[in-house]
Amino acid sequence: MKRLQFNSKYVPILMTIFLFVLLYIIGIAKYEAFSDKQVFFNLLIDNAYLIILAIGMTFVLILGGIDLSVGSVLCLVCMASAFLIEIKGVNPFLTMILMVILGALFGFIQGYLIYHFNMQPFIVTLAGLFFGRGAAALISIETINITNKTYNDIAGFRLYIGEQFMSAGSIIALVVLVVAIYVAKYTKFGRAVYAIGGSEQSANLMGINVGKTKIMVYTLSGVCSAIAGIVFSFYMLSGYSLHGQGMELDAIAASVIGGTLLTGGVGYVIGALFGALTQGLIQNLIMFDGSLNSWWTKIAIASLLCLFIIIQRVIVKRRELNKGANM
């Protein structure tokens, strides 16, 4: 009789889903209002921008890289959108298109520098972080409120499912998620990302265009950051040079908690959703409690991050031992 073997690479994502469900059950058991279905929809609404950031970050981490610029790109998009719409009177829909192009260009340049000049992703994207934040401050150091009626109507859009509703931002996040899952699982580009993350040398031998794929991944991350910036501007209805501070770390945490290995080659786009929602759920539990300081959210996420990194190291170590035993 053939023994069924469980692939250890599924452990992190399954643990994340289990943790999310467990925390949600605890919330329902402890707080009566937590059982309201709108609480779950609010998780999607409040964390839509983080979900989109984490999706882009997941592709980068699977590749074996890192992108520290995503929070600054989000900030730059918010500020540039507010400036163009409010100060220059540019059409909101044209502004959104321009912002996506801006994000794509930002990511493309970073990917180009990383590959063609063999520069460390950490250094290049750290420079991108400073550049994006500085560019936003050059536009204005003051808050620019978005009062445009069309933009406010989009921000205030509600899709009702029974008595519950979803916002435009949460719908955009789910659409981006579905597209990203398809790209990762069913396209040549998605398979190339996993192959390069597993072993760049082997990917080269397989005939995969490593340079093109790397540039495309960072471009994709830039696009996701721009879309997240647009969604965040719906949420805040303003541009401010301090928007998005530390969001790059939240995106990395969401991706890692969602089961993406920092060593590259293993990860699931759906994990970005559960990673971001788990962070939001922890924040909700603390908010519902009322007696705990909001900084406990950071402490809880830090603890989870450490736990998942330890699990990742155990999984990687076991794989190395199994490879050694089979040689």
Image (cartoon, rainbow, N blue to C red):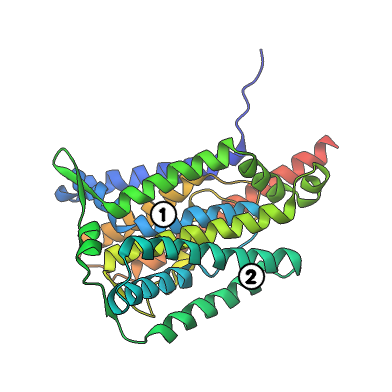
Outermost residue to the right: 327
- Alpha carbon distance from label 1 to label 2: 22 Å
Q: Residue at x 32, y 86 (%)?
A: 142
Residue 262 seen anywhere in this rendered image of the structure: no
Mark 1: which amino acid?
Answer: Ile
Q: Is residue 188 above or below residue 33?
A: above
311 displayed left or right of 136: right
Q: Which of 126/308 is in front?
A: 126
For residue 250, the mark is none
The residue tagged 1 is 51
Q: Residues within 10 Å of mark 2 (few under 14, many from 20)?
A: some
Q: Quadrant of residue 48?
A: bottom left
Residue name at image x 64 percent, y 70 percent: 122
Q: Is residue 135 shown left or right of residue 279?
A: right
Asked whether the viewer can see residue 315, the reply is yes
On the image, numbered disc 2 is attached to which residue?
122
Q: Secondary structure at mark 2?
A: helix
| Residue 94: x %, y % from top left | 37, 62
User: Image point 81% across, 38% down: which residue?
Assistant: 325
Relative horizontal placement of residue 41, taking residue 240 as reference (left or right): left
Q: Are marks 1 and 2 in contact (CB under 8 Å)?
A: no
Task: Give the x, y percent position of residue 307.
Answer: 52, 56
At horizontal 66% and vertical 12% (from top left) the residue drawn is 1
Q: Where is residue 147 shown, x and y percent of the image?
A: 21, 72
Residue 268 lies, with reference to residue 70, above or below; the image says above
Compare residues 229 and 8 and report the one nearer the observer. 229
Going by the numbered disc 2, the residue's amino acid type is Phe
* Residue 238, percent from left and from top: 29, 73
